[in-house]
Image (spheres, rainbow, N blue to C red):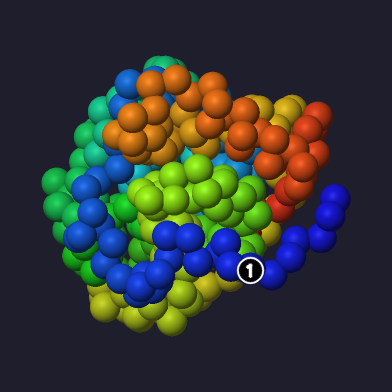
Amino acid sequence: MTPFQPPGSDWDLGLRGFTANDSLGQTMSQPSFAGSVPRIYHTYLGPLIFEDYAKDLSARLAPGANDRILELACGTGIVTRQIVGAMPKGATLTATDISPPMLEIAKQEVGTDPRVTFQAVDACSLPFAAASFDAIVCQYGVMFFPDKVKAMREARRVLKPRGRYIFNVWDSLQHNPIPRVVHETLGRLFPDNPPLFVAQTPYGWFDRAEIERVTRAGGFTNVTLEEVGFDCAAATAEDVARAWLEGTPLFPALQERGVTDLTAVRQTVTKELAARFGDKPCRSTIRAVVVTAA
């Protein structure tokens, strides 16, 4: 695979005037995970970028007997399944997400288990009593919370005094080449109104000092951050293009820009991905920051 090159001029697409410290969710509408998006997200993005980190978070959690665990932003249940598989008898899991369509898929994927309950919940306003949980886990959800400090305070409130909050966030696009190529390609296709979702939300909150500041502002006093990277691969470059264009809020964003047929856009993105990462398979690397707070 061709070595990843440092960002050039294309890196600035959609990032002019933007810093990782901006409170993105307070100035932009909440991204949409509805319609066909959740299922495509689960089918294509899940194995590409989420499964390895789900296993990592579950291993760090290491649930004990009788632990009460809360999962925030559980999405389609990718982490949920890993936790359920590792939970001993007596432990329970409350899996939550703000999106009912995502929760429905999570329920289907996890199946019926008396130890697991699903609930539509706003992470900034948790409907649980203080000191209810032994641990909280959240995979790639914190970036979406409109008031991150408030969400941290809520997490700290519902945790028991010695409870842990384990979450991850994506590192910058510089360290995640595939979404960077998707972002840059869309910027060239829509120069007057580039879709900014990729750069501003999932890959927009990576500054280590800011992550630690927000976490401590939420009431956590012991905070550790660790960079964790994996290789990633999909069967074809087109699968990767479909994952990003149809399995994320880029889908409604493109519709808002008058795209009624994704074929041409998907073909262009597929060509760029294949040229840089190969076609069958399409391989690259991913990197995230994993935070443990107590």
Image vertical order of residue 271 relative to residue 286, above or below:
above
Residue 233 visible here: no
Q: Residue at x 30, y 71 (%)?
A: 22
* Label 1 CA crowd tier, 10 Å (few <14, some 14–19, many 20+): few
Residue sitting at x 40%, y 47%:
195
Amino acid type at mark 1:
Gly
Q: Quadrant of residue 136?
A: bottom left
Give the image quarter of residue 19.
bottom left
Residue that label 1 marks: 8
Local SS, label 1: loop
Q: Nearer the viewer, residue 287 or 193?
A: 193
At which x and y percent is residue 88?
A: 51, 38
Closer to the camera in the image, 135 or 228? 228
Foreground of the two, 221 or 263: 263
Residue 122 % position (x, y): 20, 46
Give x and y (percent) for residue 291: 48, 66
Which residue sits furthest right?
Answer: 1
Observer-nearest residue: 271 or 47? 271
Q: Residue at x 50, y 66 (%)?
A: 12
